[in-house]
Image (cartoon, rainbow, N blue to C red):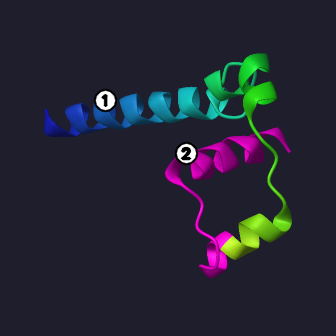
Amino acid sequence: MAERQGKLEGLKIFAKNVFKGATVNSIFDPDMTEKKVQETPEFTAKQILNHYRGKEKLTQEQFEQLKRSAKYM
């Protein structure tokens, strides 16, 4: 009985991961809408390097925008 429930749980996790993989960086991704693409600012390589080196910290909002803009490349 426990083995069957473990297989069912594994199947649920697999289905969830397939769905997640199909929606990330695709036309179904909510971050990829035309409006969000136009609103997202571009970041220079210097800004990104300075952030990771600790010279110039990006705000949390800017960091989220940076992650979103990486999807567009």
Is 59 placed above or below 6 here?
Answer: below
Numbered circle sitting on residue 61:
2
- The residue under label 1 is 8
Disc 2 residue type (three-letter): Glu
Residue 62 image point, x, y percent: 61, 49
Say few, some or many: other residues with alpha carbon within 10 Å of mark 1 (under 14 / 14 to 19 / 20 or more): few
Q: Quadrant of residue 5?
A: top left
The foreground one among 58 and 28 is: 58
**Quadrant assignment, res 2:** top left
Q: Position of residue 71 (x, y in %)?
A: 75, 41
Tell me, yes or no, whether the highlighted magenta stretch contains residue 72.
Answer: yes
Give the side of residue 53 with respect to residue 45, left or right: left
Placement of 23 over or under 65, stated as above or below: above
Q: Which residues are magenta?
A: 51-73
State the residue at coordinates (36%, 37%). Answer: 10
Quadrant in the picture for residue 48: bottom right
Name the side, left or right, on which 7 lies relative to 68.
Answer: left
Residue 43 visible to the viewer: yes
**Residue at point 38%, 29% (across, down):** 12
Q: Are marks 1 and 2 in contact (CB under 8 Å)?
A: no
